[in-house]
Amino acid sequence: MKRNVLIVFIMLVMGLPGFVWAKTSSVDALIQKLEDKGILTSQEAEQIKGEIASSEKESQEAVYKKTAPEWINNFKIGGVVLLRDQVNKRKVPGTTNLTQNRGRFRVRLNLEDQINDKVKVGVTLATEGGSDNGTLANGRSNTVTFGGNGGTNSGTFTTPYAGINKAWVQYKPTDYLTLTGGKMANPVWEPASLLWDPDLNPEGGAIQLEKRLNDYITPFSTNAMFVLKDVKTTTTRTDPYVFVTQEGIKGNLTEKFYYQLAGLGQLVSLPSHALLDNRGLGNTISTSNAAQYSYNFNTIGGAVDFGINDPFGEAAFLPIYIPQIGVFGQYARNTDPSKNNSTWMMGGYIGNSAINGWGTWKLKSFYKVLEADAWLDALTDDDFYSGYTDTKGWRTQFDLGLAKNVWFTMTYFRTNVFKSNSTISSAFSKSSAPENLFQMDLNFKF
């Protein structure tokens, strides 16, 4: 009781008009005098100092929240810094084998704010992975090579460019409907990177529906339209775009078993079959016009993910605890060409569902076949045989948590040309040319 009365007394004195406490030492001096006179013990004095400091902090926070704009209180800032050692080995028949070891890095800075109860905005700034140090930006990579990215502007200790990696607005009128516009994270669900590069952020708009009915069934729907390229001519302006629709369900079969499956349709509008980004990296090119694709790209397919949480419990026969294990697969087919038009993958994973501290880990691996005209070569995984179609191979990734917000990633690609008579660019051999790509990353989240 005595201590509580003294705390109230001191706080009242601090609030008297004309009595200014410029420093915390003024409070300490008063408490010290009470201690010297024997009114307080040393332990009580320390407790009172701590409680006054806590009360002052809460008072300042309350004033700040009351006077500051509401959007500031909901503002979030964060990001990830990545340091990479990358080794690339490709066997090219009839020529010297390619072996390259490069140091690389990547920076992403995320800014996000809930400006009211229904609208959220976000911006991500990131390094540009263009081959010409900013002159030719690469939408599928933010990773910069030590010494420059190999373009004509590269040089010793050049300063890499940074750009807008994402810029989006999200409107959520209900808990099951989300509308997003701008340059956004890809809303299309894939269990792994089959059709879309995982670093690609499309531009356009998306409508997403998701309604949890019970523990077992949550239907979801994604419909989006993305502009692929801005086209300007003297007579017409028709931009190529892709319309995506995905319908699926997810949920739990039992307390441990979970699932997710979805059907996917993707319709691409390519006026005059014009190449995107002057690519032609595997897709069949018209024999009459080298700047045009031979086919349309309209894909249909589906994907499934099935797993078990805590599959073995605390089994004594296992050297480590296994939190989760699962398998997945995906298939898609381009409806225009009659051959070389399919893509599929099958794989599995084991470990933690998320890397969130020391000792958490995950191993994920899948085999993938991407035929020449199954999908646009400008959108596929840029690390899987340099983003070419008409390819096949393995992608294996191991993640290990080293500390809070710090983890190590080892990714291995073992890839090759799918067919020896492929229409792949002459930059690579049309016969067997296997590639081994190793990426060793240290990731730091802030």
Image (tube, rainbow, N blue to C red):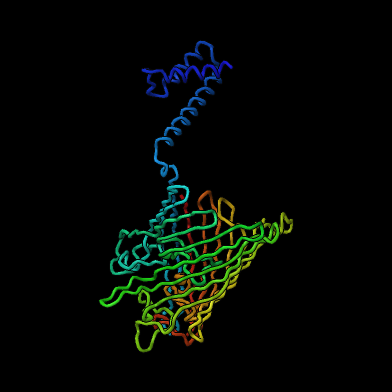
Which sits in the foreground, 214 or 362? Answer: 214
**Residue at 41 percent of width and 57 percent of height:** 168
Can residue 76 be seen in the rendering of this structure? no
Q: Nearer the viewer, residue 327 or 37?
A: 327
- Residue pushed farthest front? 173
Q: Residue furthest left?
A: 234
Task: Place residue 301 in its image quadrant.
Answer: bottom right
x and y percentages locating residue 147 in the rendered image: 34, 63
Query: From this viewpoint, which residue is outermost toward the right?
Result: 316
Name the side, left or right, on which 24 lies relative to 45: left
Q: Position of residue 402 (x, y in %)?
A: 54, 52
Can residue 343 be seen?
yes
* In this view, 53 is above or below 129: above
Residue at 54% from the left image edge and 18% from the top image edge: 42
Name, please, the residue furthest toward the top.
Answer: 37
Quadrant containing the N terminus in the rendered view: top right
The number of discs equals 0
Q: Pick whichever, 35 or 327, lies toward us.
A: 327
**Above-or-below relation of 216 to 405:** below
Q: Nearer the viewer, residue 339 or 433?
A: 339
Image coordinates of residue 139 in percent, x first then y, are 39, 66
Q: Position of residue 346 (x, y in %)?
A: 59, 72
The image shows residue 159, relative to residue 288, as above or below, that is above
Asked whether, in this view, residue 271 is left or right of residue 206, the answer is left
